[in-house]
Amino acid sequence: MLLTSDTQLNRKSYYEASVQRGPVLAALQGSTQADVLVVGGGYSGLTAALDLAARGYSVVLLEADRLCSGASGRNGGQTIVGYASGQGEFERQLGVQDAKRAWDWSIEAIQLVDQRIADHAIDCDRVHGYLYVADSARKAKALLTEMESARQRYGFETDVVTGAAVRQRIDSPLYQAAAYDSTSGHLHPLKYGLGLARAAQAIGVRMYEHSAVLRLERGQPAVARTAHGQVSAKFVVLAGNCTLAEYGPAVAPDALPRVMPVGTYIIGTEPLDPALCRQLVPSNAATCDNNFVLDYFRFSADHRLLFGGRVSYTTMTPPDLQGVMQRRMVKVYPQLAGVKVDYVWGGFVDISMNRAPDFGRLAPHIYYLQGFSGHGVALTGLAGRLVAEAIAGQAERFDVFARLQHRPFPGGPWLRTPTLALGMLYHRLRDLL
């Protein structure tokens, strides 16, 4: 499966345009050894490497492209409590007690983001505040039910409004209910990821870019081979997520069928009048609707609206992407009709069948982290900590997630993409009707 169609589109992102990357890191040449090899230079790999190095392990990190060139560097920037699956999947599989623990860990994931920002002086435009919105009576009822369940079962408080009061939270004619969450929020994802990379390098993590793992030998030690070198390590953390879909048949074929790459896209407007931004969302919260095929948006630090959605389940960039995205944006905010769009970008995120995270082991010394399903900005940082704990011999928290059962996507390697596309068409029709 080729996932390169959106690579150039990602290069056109607002995030890449608003940071100054350092020089390209050298590719791996020759043989080296480490206590731990981390495969993947996104949030989960970087936070695992950071925590492991802080514990005294020698760590090598291999990135197939550039650090944070995948989902970690071009996502919506939303730090969200909970899981894309909802808590029902956790309760059904793990029981109420462990589902509550997992919920509390999702709160910890937000706290870890803030802790790492503070500890490593990462300037990434951090903002707290999040709006969940509903665009129909049926969706409004579902939103209110979900927020009340979170309050009763998990002690999670939100400020819920309906009817005319919604316009005080978000100045859009589209929504019939809104819930404000002061814990979640947003940030500049690429600034955050590159800040993590600098922090990891500062404590001795050896990082190599353009060093895709082409073969993984699972002996003890494990040996990962690239085009021009190899790494021997006592432990391996596979944190490549969608990148593994390209290299997975040779690296992690037993984990690959449980995740699918899904394209998601964002437009960035020209800078807006700050007063207009305050009118549209007085709290400057990130916003997301509760449709199955959803829209998500927020304002950047320089007052651009970054509006995301328009998922693709075929690994192909949708036609007339900018036009489609702009029409969706104007449906939410008619006030922005005629506003210029400066940036259009996108790429793939990995999803699991049930939208719950998929963490586990391929061998006693080989760990994998995948299936973040759109909640990765915060959850990847928790995953990095849990896998570091597990390697250090404290696997209790990691093993709670490892107990979650995941089914492979139906259809096998050739039919699972069209099968998923048909399933998503059904859900899209449900949202519309």
Image (tube, rainbow, N blue to C red):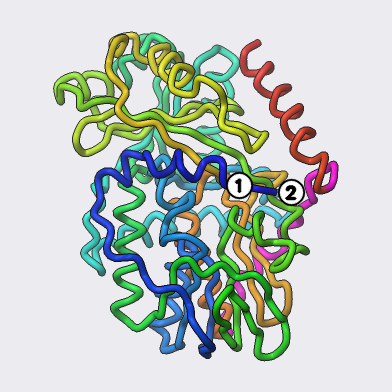
Sequence-first disc among 2 and 1: 1
The reply to whether residue 180 is visible in this rendering is: no
Q: Secondary structure at mark 1?
A: loop
Picture quadrant of residue 273: top left
Measuring 68% from the left and 18% from the top, which residue is drawn there?
430
Residue 207 at what x, y percent from top left? 41, 75
Magenta-colored segment: predominant secondary structure: loop
According to the picture, the residue beneath numbered tag 2 turns out to be 92
Measuring 31% from the left and 39% from the top, which residue is drawn there?
14
Apparent side of residue 333 relative to residue 208 in the rendered image (left or right):
left
Q: Amino acid at mark 2?
A: Arg
Q: Which residues are magenta?
A: 393-412
The reply to whether residue 323 is visible in this rendering is: yes
Q: Which of these two is toward me, 11 or 205?
A: 11
Q: Secondary structure at mark 2?
A: helix
Residue 125 at what x, y percent from top left? 24, 47
Residue 260 at what x, y percent from top left? 68, 46
Figure check: 48 above or below 52: above
Say which quadrant the C terminus sits in. Answer: top right
According to the picture, the residue beneath numbered tag 1 turns out to be 3
